[in-house]
Structures are given as C-alpha cells and as structure tokens.
Amino acid sequence: MITIGLVRHGITDWNVRGKAQGITDIPLNEEGKKQALQLGERLVLEEQWDVIVSSDLSRASETARIIGEKLNVPVDHYDQRLREKDFGIIQGTTEEERLVTWGENWRELDLGAEPMEAVAARGIACFNDLAVTYQNKRVLVVSHGALIGSTLEGLFPGKFKETKMGNTSLTILDKIQGEWNCSLYNCTTHLNQHKEVKA
C-alpha cells in the first residue's frame, strides 16, 4: 500500500501570461510562493506525510521545498520523470501567438511535442516505483499539470471529464493490493477559489 498526494506547482509569471512552459525552467513568482505556503499550512493540519519527491524543474522543486519546510519533511529526491510534458517549439508562446504562427489547427501539427501517451507512461512508471520504494508510506509528489493530468487519464481511463489541474491543487491516490484509487481530485480549498472535487 502507498498513498500519494499529487501537487501541481505554484503559479509562475508564464502561467499568468498564458505561455506554454513545458520543460523550460521557469521559477515561481511571489503568488506561487504564497500558494505553496498556503498548501503547506493546510497539510500541517491534515494527515502526516512521510516523504516528498519532486520534479527537478525549479517551479516544482521550489514548491516542494516550501511545503517541506512547513511540514518539517525534507525533499527526498528529484525525479526527471516527473517533469512537465515537453511541448516542443510552442514552449514560450501564448495561444494567440500560436494562432498567428501556425493557424487555428496548430494542435494537429507536428511541432515537436512529447506524445501524451509517453508522458502518462513515465508518470505511471514513476508512481509504481514509488509504491515499491515507499511501501506503507504517505508520499507527496510535486509535479506539473500535464504530467499529473495525463498520468491520471492513463491510470483511470474515462474517469474524469477533464484533467486541468489548478496550481498547488492536491489529488490523493492510494494503491492497495495492486489497484490505484483516487479519493480526492484537484482540490484547492487552501486557495481563494475553494475548488474541491471528490473523485
């Protein structure tokens, strides 16, 4: 058995501007740091977490460190498999810029993006490895929106209408007797919008 708390990183300036980040290493902005602290404060009041694992990209690793300091739980390691999807040549562009450059059908073009199936595969492989390494532990995993969303779609086909994750949202997974279950999805009650969806 393992419990994984999936956390999307705090907000960045590129998030605010609507720029595709992908594997570009963009830091948290001040609001993103505040969001991470708010989540840390929430988690202190909830169940104990044993270990933190994070993507090595700075917006995730910084979120993990802020939460870890609040929980007094160190970041155990950084795993490149938890990185965001590589969006290819659209990284650094806004939707408006993509429409101007490639037209309204830009999503149908080969612009060097990593296939979502490949993103899901590395996410699932990482989660399964964590389940072996941290048996009977509660593990916070700090990652990115597309990685979390595509991995959830891979683990639970057809379960969610969409997998657009909020910044510092919390999603809870349990693996019991080889089966993954999701008990909480994209919960941001620690932020002002108070969005919570039971899985």
Image (cartoon, rainbow, N blue to C red):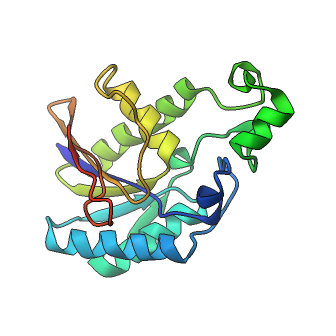
Q: Position of residue 110 (x, y in %)?
A: 77, 22
The image quadrant where one finds the N terminus is: top left
Please tell me which residue lies in front, 53 or 132.
Answer: 53
Q: Where is residue 63 in the image (x, y as percent from the top left)?
A: 46, 68
What residue do we see at 27% from left, 66% from top?
A: 190
Left or right side of 109 for 54: left
In the image, residue 160 above or below residue 45: above
Q: Position of residue 52 (x, y in %)?
A: 36, 63
In the image, residue 19 above or below residue 66: above
**Residue 125 in view of the camera:** no
What residue occupies the far right of the structure in this picture? 101
Left or right side of 187 for 75: right
Please tell me which residue lies in front, 139 or 142.
Answer: 142
What residue do we see at 53% from left, 44% from top?
A: 81
Number of marks: 0
Residue 100's image quarter? top right
Left or right side of 49 for 9: right
Q: Position of residue 183 (x, y in %)?
A: 17, 41
Left or right side of 135 for 74: right
The image quadrant where one finds the C terminus is: top left
Residue 86's image quarter? top right
What residue do we see at 22% from left, 56% from top?
A: 138
**Residue 1 in view of the camera:** yes
Please tell me which residue lies in front, 33 or 192.
Answer: 192
